[in-house]
Image (cartoon, rainbow, N blue to C red):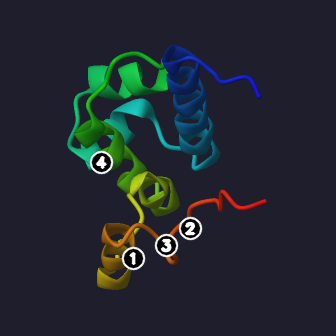
């Protein structure tokens, strides 16, 4: 499996943000205003350039892409998960027997 570079991922994300915004027929300026970010910040996101996570999340919320934000959330760890991890997993490993 070949992984994309960070710059390639940012470009793909930016392309998706732009495509979604255009599909909603909203201008860059209106999106920036509704998101509470600068026009330059929105352009940076859409161009796959350096942008803050706060700006990205704000734009996603404005465009109704809450699923994109949820995809960034770490998985929920329960107390049972933590206890299982601290015990070394669901079962203890057994040493191989020397007797053949």
Residue 26 image offset from top left, x and y in percent = 49, 43
Frontmost of labels 2 and 3 is 2
Q: Are marks 4 and 2 in contact (CB under 8 Å)?
A: no
Residue drawn 29% across the image and 25% down it: 41
**Number of marks present in the image shown:** 4
Q: Quadrant of the N terminus?
A: top right
First of labels 4, 1 by sequence position: 4
**Which residue is under mark 4?**
58
Q: Is 94 placed left or right of 75 in the picture?
A: right
Callout in the foreground (4, 1): 1
Secondary element type, mark 1: helix
Where is residue 27? Give x, y as percent. 46, 35
Q: How crowded is mark 1: few (under 14 residues within 10 Å), some or many (20 or more)?
A: few
The quadrant of the image that shows the C terminus is bottom right
Q: Nearer the viewer, mark 4 or mark 2?
A: 2
Q: In this view, does 3 lie above or below 60?
A: above
**Of marks 2 and 1, the one in the foreground:** 2
Mark 1–mark 3 distance (CA, rounded to whole Å): 11 Å
Residue that mark 1 sits on: 84
Which numbered disc flags the more N-terminal residue, 1 or 3? 1
């Amino acid at each position: 499996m070949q992984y994309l570079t960070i710059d390639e991922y940012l470009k793909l994300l930016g392309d998706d943000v732009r495509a979604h915004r255009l599909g909603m027929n909203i201008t860059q300026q209106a999106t920036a205003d509704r998101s509470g970010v600068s026009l330059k910040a929105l352009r940076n996101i859409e161009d796959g350039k350096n942008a803050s996570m706060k700006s990205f999340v704000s734009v996603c919320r404005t465009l109704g892409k809450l699923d994109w934000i949820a995809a960034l959330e770490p998985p929920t760890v329960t107390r049972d998960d933590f206890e299982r991890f601290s015990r070394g997993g669901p079962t203890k490993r057994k040493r191989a027997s020397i007797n053949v």
